[in-house]
Amino acid sequence: MSGYFLYHSIGTFPGKAEQMAASLTKFSNIWSAQDDGQWPAALAAQQRFIDAWTRLIEAPQGTLTTAENVTAALYSLIGALPAARLAGKRLLVAGDCFPSLHFLLAGLGERFGFTLDTVPLRPSETWVRDEDFIARWQADVGLALITFVTSTASHRCDVDRLAAHSRAMGSIVGVDVTQGIGVAPFSVAATPVDFVVSTSLKWLCGSSGAGILQVAPELLKSCRPELRGWFSQPNPFSWDLDAFTYADDARRFDHGTPAILASVASLPGLEWVEPTGIDAIRAQNAGLVERIISAALENGWEIRSPLDARERGGSVMVGLPPQGAEPAKIIAALRKERLYCDARGTTLRLSPGMVTTETAVDALIARLTEHIGSRRRRAS
């Protein structure tokens, strides 16, 4: 029985440990060889990572590069924009965006001349509604940052609708796809946006440090990243101090000597997701999530995620009772049963994936019934 419900944190797949070990061992042997083949091999591995991501989101060639994480990617993008795109305008985010991005943006407004506008959640609700986001989105919004799937409610936004509104308003629109990519379909070919940021940690089963930044070709042409270095150039090995120029493609967002290990460690996950297919991953996940939701409804538990699968990512959040249920103790008790999940406050986050079994789901439901009770039991 695999009781792994932590795909919202770190994803996994059958044979992950062996495949990651093989990938890292191969790289270690190349990097340790006493020859001159290290950098050609390392950069080729990084390019395979970039190519895998490019295929995954159906991005134009040359528009995607690596970043350490979504926060660094967003900072690099904002610092690269022409000043007039943000100065004197609002930058729109939702109150349920990933906190790290809000922390970043809250500190940049004065420097770049924008006003950060955070769309709040409605009272007693657990995600920002798309219509509330759109209602705050007028022509004075220079940039809007969308969260594809939220980490606190697994709410999946309507990217098509929001991207269409961005075009009507003339705003730059970016999407953080971290919590949804790999379990929900996303394509910049089908739904063009101005930029995409993500990591490879969650449903893509990669490692930390393997983030990406993808920028649409028209916006890319006008970007002049502040953080730049020898790898920002068309030829990184040009050391003429007075002849710096930006690369024509997304490599202009590169800077100093690149970190390769995260790409190497994350390639096995990406190379597992691609042949497995998002549809198969989604189907497996959806069946297990619906099993949890059915039990929650039957037992009278609060569900803090959308019930409509079209509006939900791969997780389901269950509300623990405000009195009598101690999240840390419940998590610890489940861990003893080899059932692994986590909580944010009184919100239990459950994310089953390809290694999670129906037996584990049934065991989880039984244990939660013991810990938080059942409406059926109270009624009897």
Image (tube, rainbow, N blue to C red):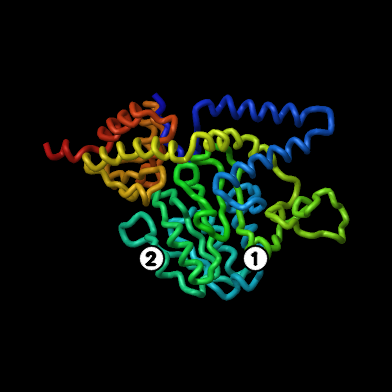
Q: Residues within 10 Å of mark 2 (few under 14, many from 20)?
A: some
Rendering quarter of residue 215:
bottom right
> Gap in Å between the C-alphas at discs 2 and 1?
27 Å
Residue at figure coordinates x 72%, y 39% from the top left: 44
Which quadrant does the N terminus fall into? top left
Rendering quarter of residue 285:
top left
Percent across and percent down for residue 103 are 54, 58
Label 2 vs 1, first from the N-terminus: 1
Percent across and percent down for residue 300 are 22, 43
Asked if disc 2 and disc 1 are in contact, CB closer than 8 Å, the reply is no
Report the residue marked by disc 1.
Answer: 81
* Count of numbered labels shown in the rendering: 2
Residue at figure coordinates x 40%, y 63% from the top left: 120
The relative height of residue 14 versus residue 224 in the rendered view (above or below) is above
- SS for dot 1: loop
Which quadrant does the C terminus fall into? top left
Along the line of sight, the residue nearer the viewer: 349 or 271: 271
Along the line of sight, the residue nearer the viewer: 70 or 172: 172
Mark carried by residue 132? 2
Viewer can see residue 100: no
Q: Residues within 10 Å of mark 1 (few under 14, many from 20)?
A: some
Residue at figure coordinates x 44%, y 51% from the top left: 149
> From this viewpoint, which residue is outermost toward the left?
380
